[in-house]
Image (spheres, rainbow, N blue to C red):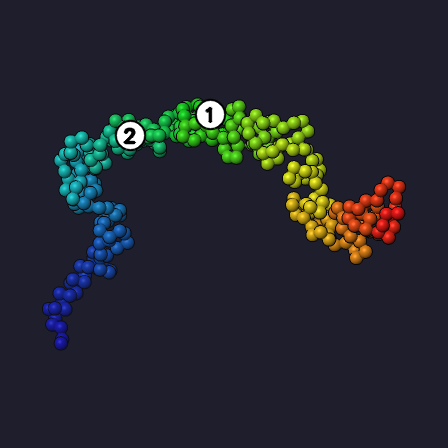
């Protein structure tokens, strides 16, 4: 079908108007490029239903004593509330408008009775809100500081595990010679507290089961406490080793049962004084 000249002229006129208005493409649908449901006013995406500067339409601002609700500027807020930034707020409890519009409480504070203050269980100490139930510098009250090694638990200072409080001091009962295993249990001179028990000071040796042992040579504790070697082996440099075929293991050492007077013919079979071991017999 051929377009009539009148229709063509009308189409050209419409396109001309669109070009003059700067529409090279159809105008974008509402919400494209921003959250759906918002309207772009002065380059900003706003909610016309609640924005007091654009209430119901771009540029329709509410009065300073009004709020925007459902796109309509309202005359008054409900009793007990005050219009602030276009919203009705309770100045006695609002953290953003505490006592007056725009008066915001600091972090950790709450608005009570129109005044900013620390929210429970926090209290103000030295200009800061602190929890006196857990703060070691202000434990139970401002300035009540816990001692070194203590922590604050439910407003009271207590020793951190594994420490215990003895005479007001945190001590380790597992290794304190003045409080070994319990408060007041003192080890004797020359003793040390190991695993909550007093024992001899082993020096370079190692304490195993209350005895000082040499982990390098002790067959019952070879390399570590209670790491025993088999009966036919000895401990050498902390490792179990078998004796040569002509020797036997006695008391953790390789010995010749044919000639050793301490182990003559068998381990621990010692010859009497003045006698020698020959061929495995005392003579």
Give the answer, above or below, for where 203 lies relative to 6: above
Pick the front one: 229 or 86: 229
Quadrant where the image shows the N terminus: bottom left
Give the answer, above or below, for where 118 lies relative to 37: above
Left or right of 161 on screen, residue 263: right
Residue at point 32%, 27% (across, down): 117
Which label number is shown at residue 252?
none
Give the labeled residue for mark 2. 111
Left or right of 70 on screen, residue 139: right
Left or right of 282 on screen, residue 84: left
**What is the x, y in percent for residue 151?**
47, 31
**What is the x, y in percent for residue 200?**
67, 33
Query: How busy is the neighbourhood of tag 1: few (under 14 within 10 Å), some, or many (20 plus)?
Result: some
The answer to which image quadrant residue 74 occupies is top left
Label 1: which secondary element: loop
Pick the front one: 213 or 165: 213
The residue at the far bottom in this view is 1
The answer to which image quadrant residue 24 occupies is bottom left
Pick the front one: 217 or 8: 217
Give the labeled residue for mark 1. 145
Residue at point 67%, 48% (across, down): 228
Pick the front one: 47 or 26: 47
**What is the x, y in percent for residue 173?**
56, 32
Residue at point 62%, 35% (across, down): 194
1 or 2: tag closer to the N-terminus:
2
Q: Which of marks 1 and 2 is in front?
A: 1
């Amino acid at each position: 079908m051929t377009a009539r000249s009148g229709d063509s002229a009308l189409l050209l006129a419409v396109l001309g108007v669109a070009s003059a208005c700067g529409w090279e493409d159809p105008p974008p649908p509402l919400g494209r490029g921003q959250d759906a449901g918002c309207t772009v006013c002065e380059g900003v995406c706003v909610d016309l239903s609640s924005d007091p500067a654009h209430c119901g339409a771009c540029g329709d601002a509410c009065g300073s004593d009004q709020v925007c609700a459902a796109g309509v500027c309202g005359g008054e807020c409900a009793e007990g509330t005050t219009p602030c930034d276009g919203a009705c707020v309770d100045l006695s409890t609002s953290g953003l408008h505490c006592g007056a519009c725009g008066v915001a409480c600091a972090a950790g504070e709450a608005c009570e009775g129109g005044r900013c203050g620390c929210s429970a269980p926090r209290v103000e100490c030295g200009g800061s809100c602190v929890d006196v139930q857990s703060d070691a510098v202000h434990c139970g009250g401002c300035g009540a500081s816990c001692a070194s090694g203590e922590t604050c638990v439910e407003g009271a200072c207590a020793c951190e595990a594994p420490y215990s409080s003895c005479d007001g001091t945190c001590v380790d009962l597992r290794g304190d010679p003045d409080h070994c295993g319990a408060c007041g249990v003192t080890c004797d001179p020359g003793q040390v507290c190991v695993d909550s028990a007093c024992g001899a000071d082993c020096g370079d040796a190692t304490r195993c089961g209350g005895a000082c042992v040499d982990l390098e040579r002790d067959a019952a504790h070879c390399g570590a406490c209670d790491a025993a070697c088999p009966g036919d082996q000895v401990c050498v440099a902390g490792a179990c080793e078998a004796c040569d075929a002509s020797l036997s293991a006695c008391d953790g050492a390789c010995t010749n049962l044919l000639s050793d007077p301490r182990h003559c013919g068998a381990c621990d079979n010692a010859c009497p004084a003045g006698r020698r071991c020959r061929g495995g017999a005392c003579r």
